[in-house]
């Protein structure tokens, strides 16, 4: 006989699952019935999940005959996912009577492409644990590897027939947020969802290959950034810098997953990339073994997930580096205390 506690906890878990599926179903009903314009926005500096989720949702809604606008400017290395003319520039104001979807946006101030006020209805779909569930309807599930996993479920709820054109950006979002299924956020559900997207006709080998293409300038920059690698705190922190000078005339479009390279330094619990952008320094943090990138970045005024987070600090580089070192030290000390 299972204990009463086990029964209660499974009851609570099931209710939790049902609750978010019910909200997704309600969103789907309302979206299907929506007669006005629909706008889809994602977070500033859109990544593969932001773009992939937006494109999959837009194509699914488009197949239902909806008028959908996606004001999103992707980095160059992701542009191949979008059809020419499919994305628009930023909107100053929302069209009257619009339904606004906000995807992969942990906090309203990180939304990009259109103002959030003025929507007739705002639907928030996200997987950041720090999301405070803003909007008229919100589905925030931090256990999901990517917002694209929730979008897969939402498109099922819409009852749209899956095509390779809808499934490909959806799987791209999952691939990018799981590092091609290598990160700890990958679970059985992630793989099952990916399997269903493959069934819809995605070419996985071709998609993963294409997502990793980089321009020639990337390789020269990679060499410069790797030459800055330093270790601190007995090797528990590895970090590198990308300065404006190194970048030169080349565009900075977030295609450079340099933190994704150094995170594999043996013995490191924290990996940080400091990226100079004009007057500010963008910080990318990756962690393992119970150390929280999210706590480090919240202390720096940013946010994100437990194992992958970011923040934006004022420059110059040396000042940002000092702040980062102090925040990482505080988290390593906290972790050492709680681990004892
Ligand atoms: P990345 O290091 O790849 O830019 O971001 C990793 C994660 O942290 C993503 O989930 C991203 O949304 C979040 N993130 C990155 N920069 C910031 C920031 O400045 N503020 C907040 N709140 N989240 C950030
Ligand atoms: Mn995401």
Image (cartoon, rainbow, N blue to C red):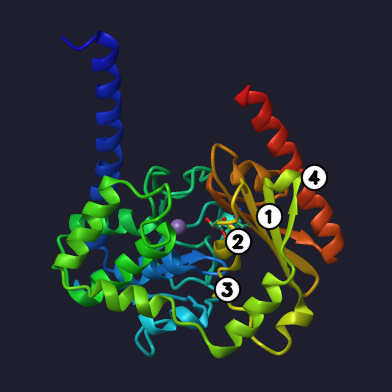
- Residue 188 x %, y %: 26, 46
Q: Earlier in the sequence, mark 3 or mark 1?
A: 1
View quadrant of ligand 2:
bottom left
In this rendering, does residue 75 appear at all?
yes
Q: Earlier in the sequence, mark 2 or mark 1?
A: 1
Task: State which mark lies toward you, 4 or 1.
Answer: 1
Q: Earlier in the sequence, mark 4 or mark 2?
A: 2
CA gap, disc 4 and disc 3: 25 Å
As drawn, the label of residue 256 is 3
CA gap, disc 3 and disc 1: 17 Å
Q: Which residue is mark 2?
A: 262
Disc 1 CB within 8 Å of nearest ligand 1 atom: no
Q: Residues within 10 Å of mark 1 (few under 14, many from 20)?
A: many
CA gap, disc 2 and disc 1: 7 Å
Locate residue 304 relative to residue 188 in the image: left or right: right
Q: Nearer the viewer, residue 81 or 255?
A: 255
Q: For residue 208, which quarter of the picture?
A: bottom left
Task: State which mark lies toward you, 2 or 3.
Answer: 2
In this rendering, does residue 33 appear at all?
no
Q: Residues within 10 Å of mark 3 (few under 14, many from 20)?
A: some
Q: Which residue is mark 4?
A: 326
Q: Secondary structure at mark 2?
A: helix
- Residue 192 x %, y %: 21, 52
Query: Image point 27% across, 16% down: which residue?
Result: 6
- Residue 237 x %, y %: 69, 49
Q: Nearer the viewer, residue 118 or 100?
A: 100
Disc 2 CB within 8 Å of nearest ligand 1 atom: no
As drawn, the label of residue 238 is 1
């Amino acid at each position: 006989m299972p204990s009463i506690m086990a029964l209660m906890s499974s009851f609570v878990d099931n209710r939790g699952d049902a609750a978010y599926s019910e909200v997704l179903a309600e969103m789907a009903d309302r979206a299907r019935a929506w007669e006005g314009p629909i706008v889809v926005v994602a977070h500033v500096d859109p990544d593969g999940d932001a773009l992939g989720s937006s494109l999959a949702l837009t194509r699914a809604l488009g197949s239902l005959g909806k008028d959908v606008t996606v004001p999103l400017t992707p980095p160059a290395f992701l542009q191949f996912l979008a059809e020419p003319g499919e994305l628009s520039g930023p909107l100053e104001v929302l069209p009257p009577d619009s339904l606004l979807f906000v995807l992969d946006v942990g906090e309203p101030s990180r939304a990009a492409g259109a103002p959030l006020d003025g929507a007739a209805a705002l639907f928030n779909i996200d997987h950041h644990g720090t999301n405070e569930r803003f909007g008229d309807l919100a589905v925030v599930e931090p256990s999901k590897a990517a917002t694209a996993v929730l979008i897969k479920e939402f498109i099922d709820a819409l009852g749209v027939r899956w095509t390779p054109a809808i499934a490909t950006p959806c799987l791209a979002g999952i691939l990018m947020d799981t590092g091609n299924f290598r990160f700890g956020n990958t679970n059985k559900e992630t793989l099952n969802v990916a399997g269903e997207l493959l069934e819809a006709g995605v070419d996985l080998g071709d998609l993963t290959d294409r997502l990793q293409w980089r321009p020639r300038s990337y390789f020269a920059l990679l060499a410069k950034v790797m030459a800055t690698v330093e270790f601190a705190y007995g090797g528990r922190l590895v970090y590198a810098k990308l300065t404006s000078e190194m970048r030169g005339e080349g565009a900075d479009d977030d295609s450079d997953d340099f933190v994704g390279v150094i995170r594999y330094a043996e013995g490191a619990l924290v990996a940080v990339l400091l990226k100079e952008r004009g007057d500010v320094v963008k910080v990318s943090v990756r962690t393992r073994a119970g150390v929280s990138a999210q706590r480090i970045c919240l202390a720096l005024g940013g946010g994100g997930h437990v194992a992958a987070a970011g923040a934006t600090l004022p420059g110059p580089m040396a000042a940002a580096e000092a702040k980062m070192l102090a925040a990482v030290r505080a988290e390593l000390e906290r972790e050492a205390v709680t681990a004892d």
